[in-house]
Amino acid sequence: SAYAPPTATRTTCGYCGVGCALDVVADGGRVTAVLPARDGPVNDGHACVKGRFAHGFLTSPERLTRPLVRRGGRLEPAGWDEALERVARGLRAAVAAGGPDAVAAVSSARATNEENYLVQKFMRVVVGTNNVDNCSRLCHSPSAAGLTASFGLPGGTDSFDGVERADCLFVVGANPVEAHPVVGARLLRRALEGAALVVADPRAVGLAVHADLHLRPRPGTNVALFHGIAHVLLTEGLADTAFLRARATGLPELTELLAGYPPERVQDITGVPAGDVVAAARLYGRAERPAIVYGLGVTEHRHGTDGVRTLANLAILRGAVGTDRGYGVNPLRGQNNVQGASDMGALPDVLPGYAKVSDPSARAVAEAVWGAPVPPRPGLRLPGMFAAARAGTLKALWVIGEDVRATDPDANRVARALDACPFVVCSELFPSETARHADVVLPAAAWLEKEGTFVNFDRRFQRVRRAVPPPGEARSDFDIVRSLARVMGADLGCATPADALAECARLAAPLFGGLSHARIDREGAVPWPCPDPGAPGEAKLYGRGFATPDGRAHLAAAPYLPPGEAPDDGYPLVLVTGRRWAHYNSGSMTRRGDGLALGPADFLDVHPEDADRYGLRDGAPVVVESRHGRARLVARIGEETAPGQVFCAFHFPASGVNRLTSHHADTVTSCPEYKVTAVRVSAP
Ligand code: SF4
């Protein structure tokens, strides 16, 4: 046949929340190179090792290329017709046994917006339940709750382009040099240009080396730290009283609470020297254009929502949000489309665009577009789904693009839930830990193999385009959901991803009414809110008022409360989990291909004092035990972690890190407390 020259396809990286634009070169249906787009709206010609090189997984021999169905206890290859018929039968049987609420779906940041939109529509319209959640439950659900409570909308307040003009960067509970490298580099560049850099993180993360001030609070004490800084802002006259009078509420209650958080008491709680609390407040409070950037070190706590809200207090006290006097409060999303999965309504309590399912007028809008009733009762959150499975009330679970068995906390309990659930379906790229529990496994297309859009961490819609075809019989989740609906006798409409976004734009017009694939194709990136096809989206929020019911920013007077568990004689160390630069989440993509050479194992970072105390050697195996389970890792001895703390990632499910983590969770959103687990270590 005639030679076809390589083609390049512009798409958006499917790994972290930065959302780098990439030009993907393919030849003969295989990706041969990935180049960072010079005109990328966010990445400006840059990309990190994951986006650039971690595409070898596409052609891994372990890719699922045919559906699998369980026969006689074994998963065996099947055709799509049989697999979808089995799924339809399983869901119908679950509904017959326990009603529509006996079925649940876990959607995903691995799925495009359009796929998330269809999944939640399928669950609400075809199954008749609001039991749909997504992986934001495990990471940034406290951001959505906290930012909504403080300002009115569940996204970061400013675009990152604005943040780059800040003269003080307060980076909290985040390691962007490893987890969001392109943004990490941009933050570092800004600091080197002269912006003050204050880092608050228990570990000596990459940016801390360059910081003017590195605060190292004990894990789980953020709320006290933020109150200490707020205390100094108020007592030293650094608050913007005119802004507070005109645009905020809650100052009297907060002032009363903050009287109990002088820097000396904050030092006792957090371990951060009182002088450093004062110094941080002065750097942030005296800056002309301060910005806050934060990560999962703020959210993945028992009081994660309070953490977000009390961090937002600082921006409100300074009048640094919704004004030209600062760049607000900005979450670094871990997964590229975790913002979008929530925006599309893959959540148990809200429809696309965050309208409450419990609100009859919101349901009426959706019902008019969908031509079908929407159940009024909020559904189960992800941990509630597992609890319901263990209790026997959840009869069918569909897990899409998530290896919940590997990544959810207290993995032994998750395994029991999956075993207890009578019918489990997985849409997956690989035979994952979760897929081993499934009755049907559906082979899914990866982000380089499908069409749609993602929303990145600063609320920008960007296009996802198919650079290569999926292997074998694998299909996009978009096709899978539509096909399953057809087998179940329903028509979801939305023949293409563009149709799905158009329908979502009609349904959630205040946020997305101006969005379409054609527009995103033209403009490259469009932020929400974008209600008008003829006007730009809002990169910086709240210039015309806050989106709260009273139009004001709400200060939060939330007291500091301790984490869910504390170290004791039996479990004397605190384990913090997070990410490393070469890998991504459970590593299912980055461990396949070249990633293993860059990060060959999950390491446990241990301070030399603790290594001496517990007889650990650098590079040698270490057993870690918590009150919940046991894991085996490789010790890495260094001073990145403080004495009394250990750190590891969760990129190698076989090491069992999430067997260690606890079921303690944010009291508002159920986000797991991944950042505080009491453990002990020993040499095997
Ligand atoms: Fe960019 Fe994040 Fe992808 Fe790296 S992983 S290329 S920083 S989007």
Image (tube, rainbow, N blue to C red):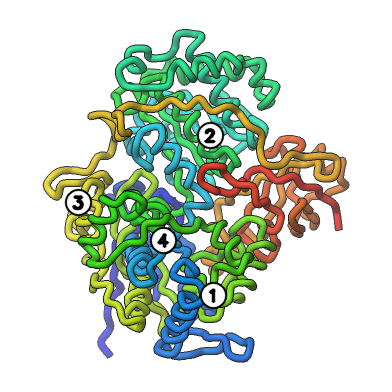
User: Which residue is located at x 60 percent, y 60 percent?
Assistant: 387
Q: Tell me the quadrant of the picture where the C terminus can be found.
A: bottom right
278 above or below 566? above
Q: Is mark 1 within 8 Å of ligand 1?
A: no
Compute the Cα span from label 4 to label 2.
Answer: 28 Å
Q: In the image, which disc is placed on residue 424?
A: 1
Query: Is residue 506 in view from this perspective?
Result: yes
Three-letter code for the amino acid on which mark 4 is drawn: Asn
Query: Is residue 50 in view from this perspective?
Result: no
Q: Nearer the viewer, residue 593 or 554?
A: 554
The answer to the question of whether label 4 and label 2 lie on touching residues, with beta carbons closer than 8 A, is no
**Mark nearer the N terminus (3 vs 1):** 1
The residue labelled by disc 2 is 307
Q: Tell me the quadrant of the picture where the N terminus can be found.
A: bottom left
User: Which residue is located at x 43 percent, y 18 percent?
Assistant: 251
Q: Position of residue 242 (x, y in %)?
A: 32, 13
Q: Position of residue 257 (x, y in %)?
A: 55, 19
Three-letter code for the amino acid on which mark 3 is drawn: Gly
Q: Position of residue 173 (x, y in %)?
A: 55, 37
Residue 11 lies left or right of residue 407; in this view the side is left
The residue labelled by disc 3 is 513
Tally the numbered discs.
4
User: Which residue is located at x 39 percent, y 58 percent?
Assistant: 346
The residue labelled by disc 4 is 130
**Mark nearer the N terminus (1 vs 4):** 4
